[in-house]
């Protein structure tokens, strides 16, 4: 009986579904910024590429607004609003 292993049962799936994911961090891009400047708890720089995010979920739409120009880091998933001093990239190549 000394060889018995006691383990705790896994958490029920309802408990995992009840937890809501934390709201994503939203920052404003600096002029001509192309890489993420977020630091992890150890102080290491993320430096992920900021990519334009077109098809964001409904929760993000409620956070940033409908049809907003938004960028997301490819690694840490931090959201960036465009630089207010820079001309928007939407509709720049129209004839």
Image (cartoon, grey):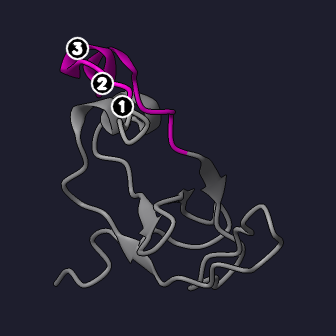
Q: Quadrant of residue 4?
A: top left
| N-terminal-most mark, 2 or 1 | 1
Location of residue 28 in the rendering, given as x and y in whole percent from the top left corner: 66, 58
Magenta highlight on residue 20: yes
Q: Secondary structure at mark 3?
A: helix
Q: Over which residues does the magenta segment extend?
A: 7-24
Picture layout, residue 29 above or below residue 47: above
Name the residue at 31% across, 63% down.
53
Q: Secondary structure at mark 1?
A: loop
Q: Which residue is mark 2?
A: 9
Picture layout, residue 1 above or below residue 40: above
Q: Which residue is mark 3?
A: 14
Q: Secondary structure at mark 2?
A: loop
Q: Quadrant of residue 63?
A: top left
Q: Residue furthest right?
A: 43
Looking at the rendered image, the disc whose residue lies closer to the viewer, 1 or 3, is 1
How far, Cα to Cα, is label 1 from label 3? 34 Å
Q: Quadrant of the C terminus?
A: bottom left
| N-terminal-most mark, 2 or 3 | 2
Name the residue at 50% across, 33% down.
22
Picture layout, residue 64 above or below residue 81: above
Mark 2: few/some/many CA within 10 Å (<14, 14-19, 20+): few
Whether residue 74 sits left or right of residue 79 in the image: it is left
Q: Quadrant of residue 20?
A: top left
């Amino acid at each position: 009986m000394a060889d018995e292993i006691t383990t705790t049962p896994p958490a029920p799936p309802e408990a995992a579904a009840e937890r809501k994911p934390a709201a994503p961090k939203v920052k404003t891009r600096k002029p001509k910024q192309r890489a993420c400047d977020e630091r992890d708890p150890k102080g290491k720089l993320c430096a992920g590429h900021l990519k334009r995010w077109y098809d964001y979920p409904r929760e993000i739409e409620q956070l940033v607004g409908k049809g907003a120009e938004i960028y997301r880091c490819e690694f840490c998933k931090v959201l960036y609003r465009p630089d207010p001093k820079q001309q928007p990239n939407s509709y720049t190549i129209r004839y």
